[in-house]
Amino acid sequence: MSKDKLGKLEKVDLREIWEKEDTHFTPWLAREENIELLGSAIDMDLVVEAEEKDVGPFRADILCKDIATNNWVLVENQLERTDHKHLGQLLTYATGLDAVTIIWVASEFTEEHRATLDWLNKITDTQYNFFGIKVELFKIGDSKVAPVFNVVSKPNNWSRSISSAASKLAHDEVGETKVLQLKFWSALNEAIKSKQDSPLRVQKPSPKHWHTFSIGKSGVHLSMTFNSKEDVLGIEVYIIKDQSIFEGLEKDKDDIEKEIGKKLSWQPLPGRSASRIKLDRNDSVLENESEWNFYIEWSIEHLEKFYHTFKNKLKNITE
């Protein structure tokens, strides 16, 4: 390619696009496609619950839920360099909630504030997660301006250590099943990360019977389930609230099942605020760790099929 065909990347001042934080930037970020972009930067699937929400004596810019854990996620915005006032608000939010992720978005982070977030992630347990996100704007020539979210601080190894989580489970006298669930999802994560071409973004593993993956659409995610009572390992598309999405996908049922190569279980779940489309692998025994490699191989193969198939279908029905 000739050099004259390449454009020059130019940085755009944030104030050229968003004059004020509360009336311009916060409403923009709270829109579904933009909170999705922020979530993608930290491998979380976020759904906005409220803007300008009271948390104790302060008012959080954006209040979200993490679909994977159902925990609160608070987003605090600054179009300027970070300052002590906003740091104090973040700490107040953390003390007022039992489990929370706090995302501090700013145009610049001072070294002391970045170091403070790193320190908070070091001294707190897995109930609390602190992210520092630098927001920038760029364009090439006369192109549209594009936002970029760069992570400047995040929890140690993000998923924290598997051993410490397992130790906490043992200390709390939680059953062996929970420990095995955590180990299995962690092993699945490692197998996915070892594949260079996998479209799947791993989420933090938890000692639960389910494990989620983003599919690029707020209110919809992929989920793995391990029913240890019935020995069933499952993959599903889980749709929250919006029944029209399920109905739109169901219209393409034959094409979807042809692409997946399997018959699926279509569950509208009447009377509930969610619906799902599911594929099961029977005779999967969580306690049989010697068989986990086969379970993981099956999981990755079908997760990637689900991801490619449903991501395209969701794009078509929601445009």
Image (cartoon, grey):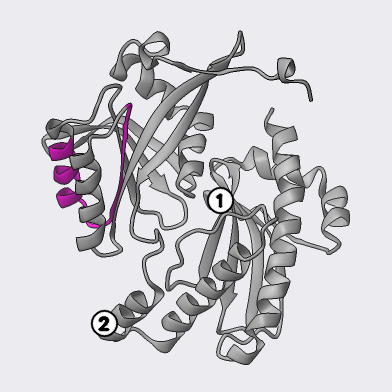
* Location of residue 170 by image quarter: bottom left
Tell which circle, 1 or 2, labels the residue nearer the N-terminal end: 2
- Circle 1 residues within 10 Å: few <14, some 14–19, many ≥20: some
The residue tagged 1 is: 274
Mark 1 residue type? Ala
Residue that appears at 66% across and 52% down: 199
The image shows residue 176 at horizontal and vertical percentages of: 42, 88
Q: Where is the C terminus found, in terms of image quarters? A: top right
Q: Check the image and report above or below for 125 versus 308.
A: below
Q: Check the image and report above or below for 304 versus 147.
A: below
Q: Where is the N terminus found, in terms of image quarters? A: top right
- Circle 2 residues within 10 Å: few <14, some 14–19, many ≥20: few
Whether the magenta-drawn stretch holds residue 14 is answered as no
The image shows residue 254 at horizontal and vertical percentages of: 87, 51
Give the number of the disc on residue 172.
Answer: 2
Secondary structure under tag 1 reads strand
Mark 2 residue type? Asp
Residue that appears at 22% across and 57% down: 98
Whether the magenta-drawn stretch holds residue 104 is answered as yes
Highlighted range, magenta: 87-107
